[in-house]
Amino acid sequence: MKIRYVLTLNDFKSLEDKWEKLFLELNLSVFQSFEFNFFSWVQEFKSNTNNKLCIVIIEKDNSICSIFPLYIDTLKRLRFINDNHIDFCDILSNIDIDIFYVLDHIKRNVSFHSIHFKNLKSNSLLYIFLNRKSLKYKHINTSDIYSELKISKGVFPNNDLRYTSKYKSEFRRVKKINKEYKYKIFESISSRLPINELTKLRDYVVSNNLRNSSFLDSNRLLLIEELYKSNKLVLSVVEKDSKIHSCSFILKSNNNYLFWIDLYDNSKLINVYNYISFIELISVNKDVCISFGRGDYSYKTKNFNPKKKKLIEVTIFKNNFSLLLYSFYVYVYKIVRYIYKKII
């Protein structure tokens, strides 16, 4: 087994075919695809020269069998590329890994202060490997929650037993309120990305303080455009008189669909209507898994009753002092956050 490090953009680009081959062997999310990681780096991280690419490659018999899509940030933390905007982080691997050996190799060959693995599912490859070893100077914390639902093929919402008459009545009410709107799914094979219309809607929600000024900036739109062109992303759109009122950017992999970013104006229940319309259309001919991504958003959980699960964050330090300092910081942060929630 050989471990090497990809540190330049050209070497990153050269991985494309082998990365995608490995990706297609595994049941992972779009966040682990080559396109998502490469274009995230190019569009959102490369311009800051303090960010350093550090992709870990494990090879066996001259074949890539594991990829850790990592970089070193400005605080010298080794972490997943674009992890703040990735709902589910993970590595790619088709072999069993001795994670202790890999981490030790990284510590001896890479200059960093700490390792931060966030947004891990409990069944993620990396978390399974980390759980097998009693690592020193490790801190485990719940980073967030995510929610998802599995829908059987059929007429929504009748194709899911969780939806009682109360839910069905609410779905009908939402559809009635928005009956004047048109619904459409945009895919790269049949439609251009309506970038001008999306920019107008983005500007509207920012100017009306529905989102902050950094929401869906030009770099994020460029990333979205690349994912759309590579058929990794579709748009779920509600419009009226050729004007977009709601758009969900949905990442897709096989029959798995993830609501990644929502963009919508203040029209009544417009985004809930968008969700209903997408699930209704996409599940009519096949079983699907719908992920609502990270966060406990009431308009998702209350209206669709998905199953909630925890996401895990694992932080690894080089010495015990750093671990204790970080543990204290997390403890204080939780107290401050609890008090803040009580006040507001």
Image (cartoon, grey):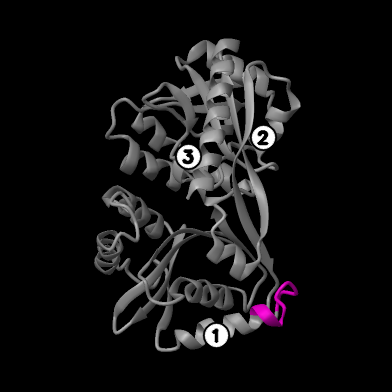
Mark 2, other Cα within 10 Å: few <14 / some 14–19 / many ≥20 = many
Q: Given this view, does label 1 or label 3 mark the residue nearer the observer?
A: 1
Q: Which SS type dominates the magenta stretch?
A: loop
Question: In the image, 241: left or right of 26?
Answer: left
**Residue type at tag 3:** Asp
Residue of label 2: 127
Give the x, y percent position of residue 65: 61, 33
Residue 229 percent across, percent down from the top left: 37, 59
Question: Mark on residue 83?
Answer: 3
Amino acid at pointer 2: Tyr
Relative to residue 105, is residue 234 depicted above or below? below
Magenta part of the protein: which range?
A: 159-167
Locate residue 96: give its quadrant: top right
Residue assigned mark 1: 173
165 within the magenta span: yes
Q: Give the mark nearest the N terminus, 3 or 2.
A: 3
